[in-house]
Image: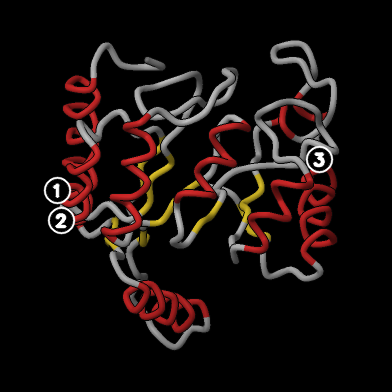
Amino acid sequence: LSFYQSRESAYGAAYGQLAYYRAMVAKGVLLDLPTGAAVEAHCQRWQLYLAGEATEQPPIGYILSMEGAPPILYPEQVDEWFAAGLRIVGPAHYGPNEYCHGTGSVGGLSSDGQQLLREMDRGGLLLDATHLADDSFWEALDIFQGPVLASHHNCRTLVPGDRQLTDEQIQALVARGAVIGAAFDNWMIIPGFKKYVTPPDDVSMNDIVTHIDHVCQLAGSARHSGIGT
């Protein structure tokens, strides 16, 4: 397990976070956007506000996602989480978990992981490929047939390491219509960055643009590159 002592503790922690989001929605600070139509409508509200055509600032909109799937107690529980508002699941985070292997570990999906992806597909959730170890990544794309994204990833060609996407992985995501969000962790942006040693000012916006441009060049357009979560 990467962060939790058990699936049950992960489940409890995730519902605690969900309670916080709901409290912020009730306060008017956040707004849950569970459908594509809701996202489009909220973007229009912000466009009107930024253009000076509306006086009241809209709340911050969000699409509920999960980084690391241990809070899902068993694959069929996807329906419960969907009813609670969950729309995107990234099965992996750092290290292995009950469903798959993530950053810093090597291996594919477990049998539960394979079933989780089938349940996500059936239930209409999106797959976030971020943090999936290479074998888990390719197995996930084979099994899951629904919409895919990579919410926060950079390019392994530019900065080595298994936390980054290879060119082949980027091209596979592009072929699935995915958007790849650029990640702003300093150590993921320039090669040789050492935490607590390399001055953060050594990393500039130009460096992150290099990753964005690399994705655009592989994709042949800017349609598959975004700003990471």
- Tell me if 186 is positioned left or right of 73 in this view: right
Element at label 2: helix
The amino acid on which the numbered mark 1 sits, given as a three-letter code, is: Glu
Q: Which residue is drawn at 47% across and 28% down?
A: 93
Residue 146, given in percent of the width and then of the height, sits at: 44, 61
Residue sitting at 36 percent across and 41 percent down?
66
Mark 1 crowdedness (10 Å alpha carbons): few <14, some 14-19, many ≥20: few
**Label 3 neighbourhood size at 10 Å, few (<14), some (14-19), many (20+)?**
few
Which amino acid type is marked by label 3? Answer: Ser
Say what amino acid the circle numbered 2 marks: Ala
Circle 3 sits on which residue?
204
First in sequence, mark 2 or 3: give its number: 2
Mark linked to residue 96: none
Residue 223 image offset from top left, x and y in percent:
68, 70
Percent x, y for residue 189?
76, 35
Q: Which residue in the protein does label 2 denote?
A: 83
Considering the numbered disc 3 on the image, is that residue within a helix, a strand or a loop? loop
Q: In this view, does 32 lie above or below 185?
A: below
Mark 3 vs mark 1: in front: 1
Tell me whether the residue at label 2 lies in contact with that at label 3, contact meaning CB atoms closer than 8 angstroms.
no
In the visual, does 97 lie left or right of 32?
A: right
Asked whether, in this view, residue 37 is left or right of residue 51, the answer is left
Mark 1 and mark 2 residues within 8 Å of each other at the beta carbon:
yes
Give the residue pinned by disc 1: 80
